Every structure is written in structure tokens, then in C-alpha cells.
Amino acid sequence: MSQIDALPPLREVITTYGLSAKKSLGQNFLLDLNLTAKIARQAGDLTSSDILEIGPGPGGLTRGLLAEGARKVLAIEKDTRCIPALEEIAARYPDRLQIIQGDALEIDPLAYLTPPIKIAANLPYNVGTELLVRWLTPKDWPPFWSSLTLMFQKEVAQRITAEPGSKAYGRLAILAQWRSDARIVLDLPPQAFTPPPKVSSAVVHLEARPEPRFPADPAILSRVVAAAFNQRRKMLRASLKAVSPMIEDHLKAAGIKPTDRAEQISLEAFCALAREIAAEQSSKS
Ligand code: SAM
């Protein structure tokens, strides 16, 4: 099971370092190194990129990324118990693995990485969506990363890649698909993890587009989409009332029926609506 490198099998690592999984840290470990190498391959060529990995745990995916030739991996792990296990990997791959113990929400990875940068992680469920939204909504675009290869609960993966008209379609789909190409590349059953979670998981791969798919002001688009999906069962003329006093006119100008609901509206139409609202705001200022 551990032919990808000369390090001990992960079950042995877990016993040696006493890494019993903690629910509070979202710990569901991948112990099959052939599987972690397969996940690493979904990130494409790693040899000319630095890789940011959040939550390496005992290091299964970290070893996959290094075995697949990652130029450098920066691994940020909150659980102090995992650090000695990760240091053992760093010793096997001199100068290619940097470990930081801390909370990924508090650490600026750019202080440690050289572009191009890819992000690959089996994310802790409790901070996964927050990190993804941060990566998708930087002040400037293109972002610091060229691609994201991320494990999520399957339901979250479906929300990221959802099409209009589906139940899963919402703010996350718009944020992800406006400026990235997003697709599910791997499905994993609960038994792939130790301990097995209650739900299935999936790996999503997102490539940052050099330009947004359709022009729109990020702040306005974000406000419109949040308001529209916060009350997704309401007609847009009602859910977006607070966004602009002229919302019915803007909806019609964007080619949207004011009686439509958020989940029927394409990304292109949301961007058109954001442009109409921006035009009203700039005509006032
Ligand atoms: N990558 C490992 C694997 O695939 O087996 C572990 C994945 S486990 C789902 C999530 C990992 O994230 C755990 O090791 C956990 O300790 C770590 N973690 C949880 N919250 C974190 C945070 N805020 N910052 C950094 N790591 C965190």
C-alpha cells in the first residue's frame, strides 16, 4: 500500500504518533497512498509549482503530492500531534516540504510560496467552505493560485459545480464558476477514510480563468447573488428590493423576468443584472 515512497505505511504512522482522529478538527484520514497519489495527479503537473496544502494530518496527501513531483509543498496543520509525523516526511524529501503548525485561517501562505502556486487539500469540513470562499473572492483577479484541487463532502462539491435550475445551485456555484472552471474529478465513498464519515466525498478541481467569464463588479455581483439566494423561494423583484429601488427595471434590462426566482437565473444573467445596477450607481455619483 505504501510503494509510492520508502516511508512507513500510514497505519503505522498513526500508531507511532498516537494520531487518534479528533472530530473537533474534522479529522477523517486517507490512509491509502495509491489513492492520495491519484488525488495529487488531479492537480496536473506539480513539478513547476509550489503547492499549498491545508490540513495534512498524518501526511497521506502530502506524500502523494511529493511522490508526484511537487516542486515544494507548504503544509499548514493545526494539530500539534501531527507535526513529528510530517517532519519524518520532510526528512525524506529535503528542502521540498515546509511545515507550519497553526490555523490556516490565520496564516498568510504567500509569505512562504513562490508562484505559480496550486492548492491541494483534503479540507477539514469545519473551515473548508470558508477557505474556498476566501480563495474565490480576492481583491484582485487573477488570484495567487492557478488551480484548486480540493476534497469536500459530496454535497458541497455539487454546490460548487451546480447548474441553474438545480437544487444545489446558489452563491457557491456563482462564485466558483464566474472566474474559474470547476468540475468534480473524483468521487470517494465513506470507506475511503479512517474513520469513515457519514457522507460521501468528492474532489473538485478548479482552474482560475485569466478573466471573469462575464464582466461584472465583484462587490455588486456578490451583493446581488447573496440577496437573491438568501430568499431563494421569493420572486427576484421581492428578494432584491433592498438592492435597488429600480430593481424591476434593472431585471427587465438584464433580460430577467421580475417574477423569476434565483435558482432559474444563469451566471450570465446575474452578471448582466450587476452591470445594470452598477450603471445606476455610477449615474448617481
Ligand atoms: N490531509 C489528511 C488526509 O487526507 O488524510 C487529513 C485530512 S482531515 C479531513 C483535515 C485536517 O485538517 C486534519 O489533520 C486537521 O487537524 C486539520 N485542520 C483542521 N482545522 C484546521 C485549521 N483551521 N487549519 C489547519 N489545519 C486544520
Image (cartoon, rainbow, N blue to C red):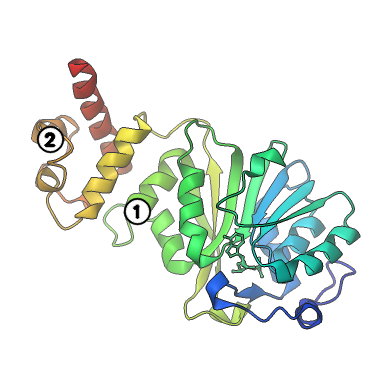
Q: Residue at x 84, y 58 (%)?
A: 90
Label pair 2/1, CB-CB below 8 angstroms: no
Q: Is residue 211 left or right of residue 240?
A: right
Q: Sort mark 2 into few (<14), some (14-19) or many (20+) by Cα contacts within 10 Å.
A: many
Vertical arrangement, residue 151 with respect to residue 212, above or below: below
| Residue displayed at 48% across by 68% down | 153
Q: Quadrant of the N terminus?
A: bottom right
Residue 58 at x, y percent in the picture: 73, 70
Real-space CA distance between mark 2 and mark 1, rounded to the nearest whole angstrom? 24 Å
Residue 168 in the image, given as x and y percentages of width and height: 33, 61
- Amino acid identity at mark 2: Ile
* Quadrant of the frame with the C terminus: top left
Q: Is residue 229 left or right of residue 34?
A: left
The answer to which image quadrant residue 267 occupies is: top left
- Secondary element type, mark 2: helix
Identify residue for label 1.
163
Mark 1 CB near ligand 1 (8 Å cut):
no
* Label 1: element kind: loop
Identify the residue under disc 2.
247
Which label's residue is closer to the chain start, 2 or 1?
A: 1
Horizontal relation, residue 200 to residue 102: left or right: left
Residue at x-position 87% and y-position 70%: 7
Q: Inspect the image, locate mark 1, and give the three-letter code of the amino acid beneath it.
A: Glu
Tell me, yes or no, if residue 148 can be seen here: yes
Q: Nearer the viewer, residue 199 or 256?
A: 199
